[in-house]
Amino acid sequence: MKADQGPDHLDPEHRVEPWPVYDRMRQECPVQHRADHEPPFYAVSRHDDVIAMLKDPALWQNRDGPGVFHQSGGVLGSADDPDHQRQRNVLRGAFVPSAIARLEPTIARIADECVDAFVGRGEGDFFELFAFPFPAIVIAELLGVPAERRADFGRWANDLVAALGGGSLDGYERAAAELAECIGEQLDDRLARLDRVDRVAVGADDAISLMAVAHRDGVLSRHEVQRLGHQLLVAGHETTSGLLGLLLYRLVQRPALLAAVRHDRSLVPALVEEGLRFDSPVAGLFRTNARACRIGDVDIPAGSKVEVMYASANHDPTVWDDPDELRLDRDPRDARSHLAFGWGIHHCIGAPLARLEARLAFERILDRMHDIELTGEPISHSPFILRGLHHLPLRWRPA
């Protein structure tokens, strides 16, 4: 059986409030074929189907890239085992809870500095002032990139993410080349400082230093180090930026909920988890099937690009009560069962970092921005891979 075209979840009308179109997809065409898109692709929207795909990485492969275009030669989230596991093992030391806990004072300081720089204005674009620069500085800190290069990270991230959703490949190639050069320079710096006897980085435990040790030991190639830096930037910056902007927007829309969290700061972790479920920053990533197969009653030819729609799965009423409501009273045992960070062997390695950034950010927003209100309409990203706002005009009373 062929998949029906069905509702258009790429229509700009649905970017900020996609729940109705997701609901229609789950009911009318849970496996949708977008033959009108160039290149064409399939989209899978029901939670059970999404989980079934994620449970079978041998069939649903990552090596052709997470976007709608076929892009080979990826790493980590764009690679399959055994390469994926080898690369993940190198980076695990930078993302284990103990390493993230050591970073908390630094991230808290970055958050304070970012808020200090704009809060006194009382008005402005929250995306430009905070949601965009804060995670860019944090991921640069995690990588170990000098402060003078951090402004470039945001520009590169925008161009790289745009291509995932069908944007300019020229812009992607230019940004990828510049980022690779930057990571290469940092790698050379670390290699020059490696102790030739112990082969450990002198006085550094940032991600590039960990990768430099792996490169010296023959575990990672130079190209892999550059590509891993690329992926950490895209995954570590854009998703957190999207979460911060969308979640603050939802709170401004819901004054009673904002007041409740402001009154009881112990609700902030629950707010972050529900924000991840409700407004999943990763709308969906693409997998490619190694052989012809069926999802439901739809035949999928081998080598098809298939969008795994995490955001739709996170609103599936077969799993969540009142899925289109932002609630902080969900059972804590279920709170982290959302798919905002994926599932299985490719579960996002940076999840602990994203949660920490969001918690620290909202603790400061609640402390220092009172009487927050919209002064215009938010504008969302155009790519359909990641969700977020690139314009959130607000007015507030500095506390």
Image (spheres, rainbow, N blue to C red):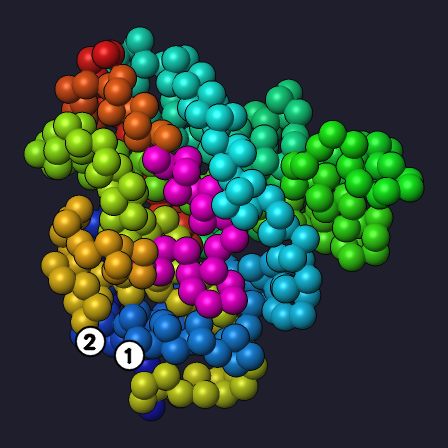
Residue beneath label 2, please?
A: 28
Task: For the residues labelled 1 and 2, say whether their Cβ atoms are less than 8 Å apart.
Answer: yes
Measuring 39% from the left and 25% from the top, which residue is drawn there?
Answer: 130
Q: Determine the CA span between mark 1 and mark 2.
A: 9 Å
Numbered disc 2: secondary structure: helix
Q: Quadrant of residue 72?
A: bottom right
Left or right? Give the position of 234 relative to 374: right
Label 1 or label 2, whichever lies nearer to me, is: 2
Could you say where residue 358 lies in the image, as x and y percent from the top left? 36, 36
Could you say where residue 147 lies in the image, as x and y percent from the top left? 62, 22
User: Is disc 2 surrounded by few (<14), some (14 to 19) or many (20+) residues within 10 Å?
Assistant: some
Asked if residue 80 is among those painted magenta in the image, a careful observer would answer no
**Magenta span covers which residues?**
338-359
Specify which label sits upstream in the sequence, 1 or 2.
1
* Whether residue 40 can be seen here: no
Measuring 61% from the left and 69% from the top, which residue is drawn there?
Answer: 80
Q: Residue furthest top?
A: 120
Residue 245 vertical position relative to residue 130 in the rendered view, above or below:
below
On-image quarter of the C terminus = top left
Q: Quadrant of residue 102?
A: top right
Measuring 78% from the left and 37% from the top, which residue is drawn there?
Answer: 201
User: Is disc 1 surrounded by few (<14), some (14 to 19) or many (20+) residues within 10 Å?
Assistant: some
Residue type pointed to by label 1: Asp
Q: Residue furthest left?
A: 256
Left or right? Give the position of 54 relative to 377: right
Asked if residue 348 is among those painted magenta in the image, a careful observer would answer yes
Residue beneath label 1, please?
A: 4
Residue type pointed to by label 2: Glu
